[in-house]
Image: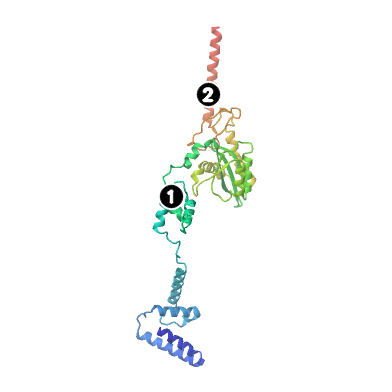
């Protein structure tokens, strides 16, 4: 404290002194510092007060670092930064939070919740306010007794139980040749893993996604549930549209792509078998490329060999076909029409041998008669 008073007194006296006397005193002080440095070469010890004085002078006039002799200028700057960190640490300290609830009130809340199983937190909160106990509703919900309830239906069970009425929707990004981004929209039915709709846009919005859902379900039976992720593109216009269509929205949990696994798997197949082998020039070529998997999925056998009905195609004339879809089945290949020459040759030999057997049977019957 005495050092601080001496500094203040010297500063006040310096206001009334001439410039020549001040310069002479500064030179005398500097010479004394040089003599002291020669006499005591060991490192000087600074107190917190000394450091504060130097830091304050540095804040007022940063050029004083050129006149420092007993300490390096970098050390004063380091002290200033340490004081800055300490100041903001003190200013950002944790304030006192919500006052703690007394143990008597905690026991009272627990007893009220156990004695009245049908009462929720709002009802108990209202009763406590009638008793003159000022407490928040969230605190009441925190200290209520927890009851063991039967486990609810999990996400996997929901997908297995409602496979026939679930459709999933998802967006994916495709870069073009000019490094622009196009967004593809995929709508998939879970019962037959059938692609309902494929859309492309450079800037997806909630109105555009809602319009795509309406076009996808225009000539198809409306699904009961629509599984989607928590992308912000599914806004209020989208939710209003699907509610008006009678579809129940089922967003997945955050950071859980496995809950929309069917759409994710199909998007991966489209990338591996289509998009990774072509360079997209624009919106129209990308729309054409994405329409190919949907066409091949509806007409998988274009070669005329076999003429079979795959699991991804439902015969429109046979409405009684209701084969249960295996939930563990994965999305098939996007090009099932590629048949090896060996298979074609084997199919040809089998058909020719079958024709010979039928001809021999007819000839034997004619000889008997």
Q: In the depicted view, which residue is nearer to us: 222 or 275? A: 222
Per the model, the C-alpha gap separating discs 2 and 1 is: 79 Å
Q: In the depicted view, which residue is nearer to us: 91 or 290? A: 91
Q: Residue at x 49, y 40 (%)?
A: 158
Could you tell me residue 351's position as x and y percent?
54, 22
Q: Which residue is mark 2?
A: 349
User: Residue pushed farthest top?
Assistant: 369
User: From the image, which quarter does the C terminus lie in?
Assistant: top right
Question: Circle 2 sits in a helix, a strand or a loop, which is it?
Answer: helix
Whether residue 4 is visible: yes
Residue 284 relative to residue 344: left or right? right
Packing grade of label 1 (10 A; few <14, some 14-19, many >=20) is: many
In the picture, residue 367 is in which quadrant? top right
Q: How is the image coloured?
A: rainbow
Q: In the depicted view, which residue is nearer to us: 196 or 240? A: 240
Could you tell me residue 312's position as x and y percent?
55, 34
Examine the rendered structure and indicate whether residue 265 appears above or below residue 81. Answer: above
2 or 1: tag closer to the N-terminus:
1
Residue 176 relative to residue 106: left or right? right
Could you tell me residue 122's position as x and y percent?
49, 52
Could you tell me residue 183's position as x and y percent?
59, 48
Q: Which mark is residue 113?
A: 1
User: Residue pushed farthest front?
Assistant: 131
Determine contact: label 2, label 1, CB under 8 Å. Answer: no
């Amino acid at each position: 404290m005495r050092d601080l008073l001496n500094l203040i007194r010297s500063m006040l006296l310096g206001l009334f002194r001439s410039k020549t006397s001040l310069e002479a005193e500064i030179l005398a002080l500097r010479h004394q510092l040089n003599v002291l440095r020669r006499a005591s070469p060991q490192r000087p010890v600074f107190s917190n007060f000394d450091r504060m004085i130097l830091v304050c002078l540095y804040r007022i006039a940063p050029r004083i670092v050129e006149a420092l002799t007993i300490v390096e200028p970098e050390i004063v700057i380091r002290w200033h930064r340490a004081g800055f960190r300490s100041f903001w640490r003190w200013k950002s300290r944790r304030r006192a939070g919500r006052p703690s609830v007394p143990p008597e009130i905690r026991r009272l809340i627990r007893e009220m919740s156990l004695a009245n199983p049908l009462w929720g937190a709002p009802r108990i909160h209202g009763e406590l306010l009638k008793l003159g106990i000022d407490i928040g509703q969230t605190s009441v919900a925190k200290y209520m007794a927890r009851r063991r309830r039967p486990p609810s239906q999990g996400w996997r069970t929901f997908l297995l139980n409602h496979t026939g009425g679930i459709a999933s929707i998802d967006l994916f990004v495709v870069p073009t040749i000019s490094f622009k981004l196009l967004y593809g929209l995929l709508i998939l039915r879970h019962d037959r893993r059938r692609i309902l709709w494929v859309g492309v846009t450079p800037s997806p919005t909630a109105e555009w996604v809602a319009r795509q859902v309406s076009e996808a379900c225009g000539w198809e039976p409306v699904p009961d549930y629509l599984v989607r992720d928590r992308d912000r593109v599914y806004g209020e216009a989208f939710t209003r549209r699907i509610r008006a269509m009678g579809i129940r929205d089922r967003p997945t949990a955050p950071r859980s792509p496995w809950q929309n696994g069917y759409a994710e798997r199909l998007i991966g197949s489209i990338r591996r078998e289509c998009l990774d082998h072509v360079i997209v020039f624009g919106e129209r070529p990308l729309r054409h490329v994405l329409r190919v998997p949907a066409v091949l999925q509806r007409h998988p056998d274009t070669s005329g060999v076999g003429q079979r009905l795959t699991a991804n195609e439902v015969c429109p004339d046979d409405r009684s076909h209701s084969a249960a879809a295996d939930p563990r089945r994965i999305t098939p290949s996007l090009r099932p029409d590629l048949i090896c020459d060996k298979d074609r040759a084997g199919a040809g030999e089998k058909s020719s041998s079958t024709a010979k057997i039928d001809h021999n049977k007819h000839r034997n019957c004619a000889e008997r008669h």
